[in-house]
Image (spheres, rainbow, N blue to C red):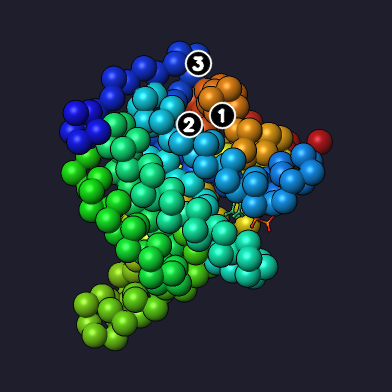
Amino acid sequence: MAERTGELPRVVRPDLGGPFPEHIAIIMDGNGRWAEERGLRRVFGHREGIDSVREVTTECARMGVKSLTLYAFSVENWKRPRAEVRYLMRLLRHFLVDERPTLMENAVTLRCIGRLDDLPEEVLRELRKSEALTSANRGMRLRLALSYGARSELADGLRALVLDVQRGALVAAEIDEETLRRYLYDPQTPDPDLLIRTAGELRLSNFLLWQASYSEIHVSEVCWPEFRKAALLAALRDYAGRVRKFGGLISDRATPVPPVRRAVT
Ligand code: IPE
Ligand code: IPE
Ligand code: MG
């Protein structure tokens, strides 16, 4: 039975005429607005957003994306009204249980990043179960950012790093960017190539500040509950047309170099 095997899905990558991202990270925003625009309470938007998570995850797995990071709940989101937080945690627990067959069917490995100890015990339990169940899958890595904040990630990493220096496991003078990376959450996953934010807001909201240094950013006007295959393809098409330079130049074509100093006339 496909649900039990976790066999790799047949990869069908659309030809969008350019590069394809290996790692996509998404700030799933606009659930509340989507609901309010329809005269519904905000939580209806969160519930509807689950269908987008399923569709985007499945599409990405089938297109051969290697990693997908979804910003589902930030450290700052604990400030929201208690009833909304409680609803989101219940939704998360149901998602973790209900989506296991879909994850297995698509050979997806689930990993979570963030201050997971902040989560209610029953959520953490289901999360660990899903991580264990999917750990041997060989397809896409789905990373849920939960109680995640990039500044907390840096603080948590630095605390661990300083302890290692104090006990002599690390030499301060030898710390470089790669050392620091090892202390971040899930450092094996390469940086996102494409960072998508839905619902039109032009900010990072404390998401992957270190890892997104050179990510290409695509902002979609579509609210998350409506972000489905068509919107994903639009983001991928946008990415396919980008030129990534990482501070260098596109090519080293030999062009005449002007003298450093202008001639004095
Ligand atoms: C994103 O949608 C979901 C979470 C942050 C948990 P919002 O709830 O932020 O929706 P808007 O931005 O208020 O519309
Ligand atoms: C960012 O959305 C967090 C998640 C999508 C989980 P927010 O709605 O919390 O961000 P702000 O408050 O608009 O910056
Ligand atoms: Mg929001």
Query: Residue at coordinates 52% horizontally, 42% vertically from top-left?
Result: 50
Q: Are marks 1 and 2 in contact (CB under 8 Å)?
A: yes
98 or 247: nearer the viewer: 98
Q: Is residue 246 above or below residue 230?
A: below
Query: Residue at coordinates 38% horizontally, 44% vertically from top-left?
Result: 98
Q: CA distance from mark 3 to mark 1?
A: 17 Å
Residue kind at label 1, given as amino acid type: Arg
Disc 1 target residue? 228
Image side of residue 93 versus residue 133, left or right: right
Disc 2 target residue? 55
For this orientation, the residue located farthest to the bottom is: 166
Residue kind at label 2, given as amino acid type: Glu
Q: Secondary structure at mark 1?
A: loop
Q: Where's the C terminus, which quadrant? A: top right
Q: Is mark 1 within 8 Å of ligand 1?
A: no
Query: Residue at coordinates 54% horizontally, 36% vertically from top-left?
Result: 52
Q: Secondary structure at mark 2?
A: helix
Query: Residue at coordinates 49% horizontally, 58% vertically from top-left?
Result: 90
Q: Secondary structure at mark 3?
A: loop
The first of marks 3 and 1 along the sequence is: 3
Residue 185, image x, y percentages: 37, 61
Q: Is mark 2 within 8 Å of ligand 1?
A: no
Q: Is residue 113 above or below residue 8?
A: below
Residue kind at label 3, given as amino acid type: Leu
Residue 181 visible, this orientation = no
Disc 3 target residue? 16
Q: CA distance from mark 3 to mark 2?
A: 20 Å
Image side of residue 14 versus residue 228, left or right: left
Residue 172, image x, y percentages: 33, 77
